[in-house]
Amino acid sequence: MSLINVFVRQDSVSMFSDTRLSIGSNRIGDVAKVFAVPHLNAVIGVRGPMKALQVVVDMVVPLADDFKGLRAALSRFSELSAAQMLKGNPVPAEIDIFVAGWNDGPVAYFLANHDGHGIRPFRLIDIPYALVTPRVDDGLFQELADEDPEFSAMRKVIDAQVATYAVVGGAITCTTIHQDQITMRRFSSYHR
């Protein structure tokens, strides 16, 4: 399980991720879970097996000329994946794919290849202002509505996620997309 949180503002969209790599509940190292795609002014993050991130990037990014094209390519990728499942080819693992970027303003969406979130698999879901995974208490999530520039509420959400889920941790990175730039920084650290 990975931590991927997305927060959409008027002038930017940020994707937070942990770096903990685990097999079961055993930490085996740290790895980046977000891939920047500067020529599309986008980032892609994945929860699930880390090889899935490279597969998604390799299969979807070459089909896109811009951020709108990235959504269309990911939609086509999800249709092909769903068709394979209908043919009886099992999904090797549960995977959540998150995309954030700039398209006439900040935009974010996600899809999952499973129904573990209570939605139909392979359906692109827009993220209007925030999404946190793994889940936190609704009251804590509601604090994100009043988020400040230093991400104080997001820090509380991440603290709760790390405290609740043993496989979440390592360094927390924050990748922010503005109209003309992508920045990545270490947000905090939860090495234990």
Image: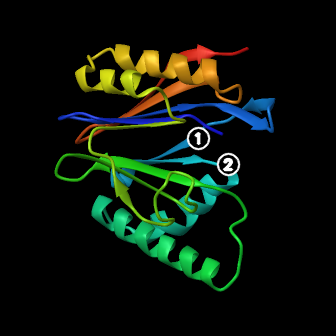
Secondary structure of residue under mark 2: loop
Marks 1,2: beta carbons within 8 A? yes
Q: Residue 177 in the image: x percent, y percent?
A: 32, 38
* Whole-number angstrom distance, CA of label 1 to CA of label 2: 7 Å
Front-lying residue, 27 or 161: 161
The residue that appears at 70% across and 82% down in the rendered structure is 88
Quadrant where the N terminus lies? Answer: top right
Front-lying residue, 137 or 11: 137
Q: Amino acid at mark 2?
A: Met
Secondary structure of residue under mark 1: loop
Work out whether mark 1 precedes mark 2 in sequence or the reverse, and give the earlier one.
1
For this view, does 24 lie left or right of residue 163? Answer: right
Q: Amino acid at mark 1?
A: Lys
The residue that appears at 47% across and 68% down in the rendered structure is 62
The residue that appears at 26% across and 16% down in the rendered structure is 148
Q: Is residue 49 above or below residue 122?
A: above
Crowd around label 2: few <14 · some 14–19 · many ≥20 (10 Å): some
Identify residue for label 1.
33
Front-lying residue, 126 or 17: 126
Q: Is residue 166 above or below residue 56?
A: above
Q: Is residue 136 above or below residue 41?
A: above
Q: Which mark is residue 189?
A: none
For this view, does 59 lie left or right of residue 11? Answer: right
For this view, does 44 lie left or right of residue 23? Answer: left
Identify residue for label 2.
50
Q: Residue 28 in the image: x percent, y percent?
A: 81, 32
Q: Residue 73 in the image: x percent, y percent?
A: 41, 70
